[in-house]
Every structure is written in structure tokens, then in C-alpha cells.
Image (cartoon, helix red, strand yellow):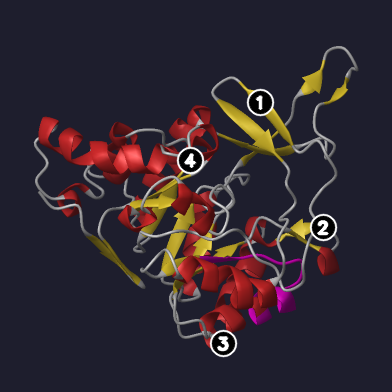
Amino acid sequence: MNTKINIPGLELDNPIIPASGTFGFGYEFANYYDINILGSISLKGTTLEARYGNPLPRIAECKEGLINAIGLQNPGIDKVLSEEIPKLEKVYHKKVIANVAGSTFEDYVECAKRFDKCDNVGILEINVSCPNVKEGGISFGVDEKMLYELALEIKKNVKKPVYIKLSPNVSDIVSLAKACQKAGVDGLVMINTLLGMRIDLNTRKPVIANKMGGFSGPAIKPVALRMIYQVAKEVDLPIIGCGGISNAYDVIEMMLAGASAIQIGSENLIDPYACKKIIEDLPNVMKELNIENLNDIIGGALNE
């Protein structure tokens, strides 16, 4: 029974990767179990300068999910490279995914260039859901031309494989995926969170200080599956799928839609052992569904 997956930049013992922002810098979870069982780890989103994040409260619980507006709190690229990654290297012995975020075009490129020199980084995951301050609040991830130009510039300046993490808050995700392919990127990560909000019935005000935030969890799995399926039919790039995955059956379903590997997000916040449990359950579910090799099922539903 084969759970190994190869994608540009990473050789995975299994397709399970904790999603950025839900697993810290990884070493924190080594107190719970041997994190070397993970396929890889997507590090917390990192910007050029340190960020302190949005005002509290930042999280609101919902049925089948949660809303967060953390605001990319992180210590900045220099401290991540000099302090956080060395801590992780002591307890995790595989290459990781560096999640790159920014406010401007220049921020993204410089941050990607610095991560590119880090031996323990296998993939640069570019988070394009953040507002571009210089363009008056337009997100790179919803503008096809800006996304193409950003992806092209990053590719020109780095050697490691570049994956773009696409936002689902668009009308046509296929055209954005095609722009990434045209720019020469090596893969896609999809989907990021959906924009949502909750209102406190007593105060009659939004629950989180930022008013709106990213909605994630099991409720968004059908949306993620639909978008991965649509993109996989039209774009020839490996996809790391994420969005509402909470068990090994969900993993198989997302791979049938076209994903080559899977990121686990909100479930880590509910259960710190979530990834471990899914990795341990995966061979049993494969046996139940008569799957000998995970590579055989990638995109298995695309012709239906």
C-alpha cells in the first residue's frame, strides 16, 4: 500500500500537511507526538517585517467551522530564518513549505528571495489574499493581471518551486489559475478561506474586531472540492488541496477531485492530534476502498 506522493519541491511519505496559520512553526506540536510522521509542514504566514496582527477578538465559532481575522501576526522573515526554523530543524527532519505574505509587490519578492536561500524550505507558498496597500486595497489574488505579474517576478528571482495559494473569493478561479500557469509557477494551493462574518445578538455588533474574516472548516469542503475539480480539468499543475478536511475519507475525496496532496487547517485548532489521526487512518480507508496506491486516484473523478 503506497501513500508516498512526489510533487515539485517535496517527496512526501504521505499527502498530509498542516496548513499555514494552524500549526505555528511546527515545533510547538512536537510536545504532542513525533511530527516527523507528517508529509511536510506549511509554516505560519511570514512577511518581510514583523506584524502584530488585528485587534482582539479575532476568532468567532460557527456551525461546522470558524471565522478568523488574525492579520498575519508573525515575527518577520529575519526572525523566522534565524530563530523559528532552527527550532523546527531540531525536531523535524524533512523539508517544509514557507508561506510568503506581504502588503506590496516588493514585499512578496524580497521575502521569497530570502526563503529561497534556506536549505530546509522545499516550496515557496505565495499567499495572495492580502491587500495591496500601494494599489488602494486591491488584493493580488482577485486581479488576474496583477497575479500574473507577481508570480512571474517571483519566479524570476528564486530557484525553489513556487506554489500560489489561491483565494476562493473570486468569480472565476479557473482564469486566475491559468494566469499562474502562464507565469510558470510550479503548483497551486487551494482554497484559502471564504470571507464571512458573525454578529453578536446582545451587542448587535460584529463578533470579531475586524468585522469580517476568513471562514474555514468542514462547511467549506464542498466549495473547495468544486474549485479544485474545476481548476484540475483546465490547468496542468499539481494542486495541494485544502478546505474543510477533517478525516481520511475527506482526503480521498479531495484527491479524486484533483489534489495531489492535502493541507489540514481548522481541524488542527479543534484537535492537535488531527493530522496524526488522519495519517494513521489513511491506510485503513485505502484498504476499505480498494486503493493500493494514492497516486492512482489523483483526479480520478475528472472524467465523470
Mark 2 highlights which residue? 137
Name the residue at the front extreme.
Answer: 31
Using a 10 Å C-alpha cutoff, classify the residue at mark 1 as few (fewer than 14 neighbours), some (14 to 19) or many (20 or more): few
Mark 3 highlights which residue? 157
Q: Is residue 96 above or below residue 67?
A: below
Q: CA distance from mark 4 to mark 2?
A: 25 Å
Left or right: 240, with 176 as reference point? left
Using a 10 Å C-alpha cutoff, classify the residue at mark 4 as few (fewer than 14 neighbours), some (14 to 19) or many (20 or more): many
Mark 1 highlights which residue? 61
Circle 3 SS class: helix
**Residue stretch in magenta:** 98-110
Q: CA distance from mark 3 to mark 1?
A: 40 Å
Residue 132 — which label?
none
Name the kind of residue labelled 4 in the image: Gly
Task: Examine the rendering and report whether any part of residue 169 can be seen.
Answer: yes
Looking at the image, which residue is at 68% across and 73% down? 79
Mark 4 highlights which residue? 243
